[in-house]
Amino acid sequence: MSPERRFSRWRGLENYGLTCCVNALLQSFIATPELKFLLNRWDSSSVREDALNNVPVHLKGVLGAIRDPSCRAPHKDFLRCLDRQHIQLNVQHDADEVFLAVLNFIHQQMDDKALALEIQSLYRLSVELHHQCVECSSNQSLPGPSYLLSLPLHIRHQNNTLKDCLASFFELQELSGIDNCFCDQCKTRTPFKHGHRILSLPTILCVQLQRFCYSDSGWMYKLNCSVEFQESLDFQDICSQDVFSKDFQKNEGTKYSLFAVIVHSGTAMFGHYTAFVRATGGSDWFYANDSHVEPVSWEAVRETYGGRSRTAYMLLYRREPTQTQGGGEGEEQEGERQEGERREGEVQEGERQEGGRRKRKKRGGEKQEGEKQEGEKQEGAVHEGGRREGKKQGVGGNKKGRNRKGRN
């Protein structure tokens, strides 16, 4: 599919009163065919009570109607539904909060709990908070699933990289002195090594860059420092081996590809959200600013690293399938993505064929109408010729009759 055709199929979303945050998130959901595939498996018609306030029902509706050119506002009911669920219109919201709220509504409001769990599993990052006593090496681990990897930006005030932020987040830190922790084995406060360990990685990795902070006086401000990120990411190259739990399945894959960037422009008190999204199965990037959508280059995406008020706020990466996953989760995920692409292609091909059929029907109708008019014209000419011939014959007959009569 050519970039021009992909662009013609990518739609903007109108702003209905400070809805830029939701619009940007919806663009990232649209660029996630795995989500649409799972929602399409859900029989939402079973939701009879309070369907008007059911967020996953309306999210499914948006993802289904976004490719329908006859639907002028495919997300309007979704926005109204969120408004009734206290994510109000005409009120500023943070993208990460709305993202987590939507996943929470999916968990709460879908009657098919197994399918709701599959949807959440797309984004679930399983980590454990690891504590190890330096004196006796006893371990304490507290597992905790997360759907958003929130990274602090305190490495360097100006130039940071996503790899540095990730490495710092998962790096083991030693707690000593006044930070000593109580050890059950030693029965006293001892130095501890503290950090996060990875149990499993998600299909869709959502990274939030913590750009909003509070000053000592309680005022919120925004960090515009530069954070460089790349289109590809590999946790094996970033984290040391001891960051991965012994239960981590390395054949699940640790490589990711960037497909969406949620951008915040402005200050901590007032701003605007937009999104860069990459076309499914391709390398073409598009910039969605509410109803306006345009194709852009990777260089345009890189301009959101920081150093100015227009900065990347959330990064969405898709895990790449591995060669050793034969029949496993990777093939299933790839199959889901291909199925989503196939269905989207069928819709687009159907629209193309329907357009061609209508054009042929129109041309056929015009041809039939022309033939009909030509037939009527010829038939009229035949009638006119017959009438004239009959008139001529009638005059001559009368004339002959009169002549005969005269002779008689």
Image: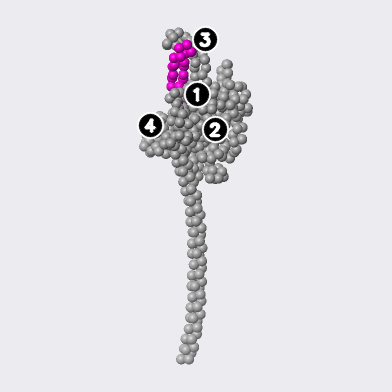
The residue that mark 3 highlights is 178
Which mark is drawn over residue 241?
A: 1
* 202 in the magenta segment: no
Q: Which residue is more in the foreground, 385 or 357?
A: 357
Which mark is drawn over residue 113?
A: 4
Look at the image and tell me whether residue 224 can be seen: no
Per the image, label 2 sits on a secondary structure element best described as strand
Q: Which residues are magenta?
A: 126-144
Q: CA distance from mark 2 to mark 3?
A: 41 Å
Magenta-highlighted stretch: main secondary structure? Answer: strand
Q: Residues within 10 Å of mark 2 (few under 14, many from 20)?
A: some
Q: Which residue lies at the image location 52% right of the left edge and 15% below the top edge?
A: 174
Disc 1 and disc 3 in contact, CB within 8 angstroms: no
Please, what is the three-letter code of the amino acid marked with disc 1? Gln
Q: Which mark lies nearer to you, 2 or 3? A: 2
- Rendered view: 381 above or below 339: below
Give the left or right position of residue 402, taking residue 159 as reference.
left
Per the image, label 4 sits on a secondary structure element best described as helix
Q: Position of residue 11 (x, y in %)?
A: 53, 41
Per the image, label 1 sits on a secondary structure element best described as helix
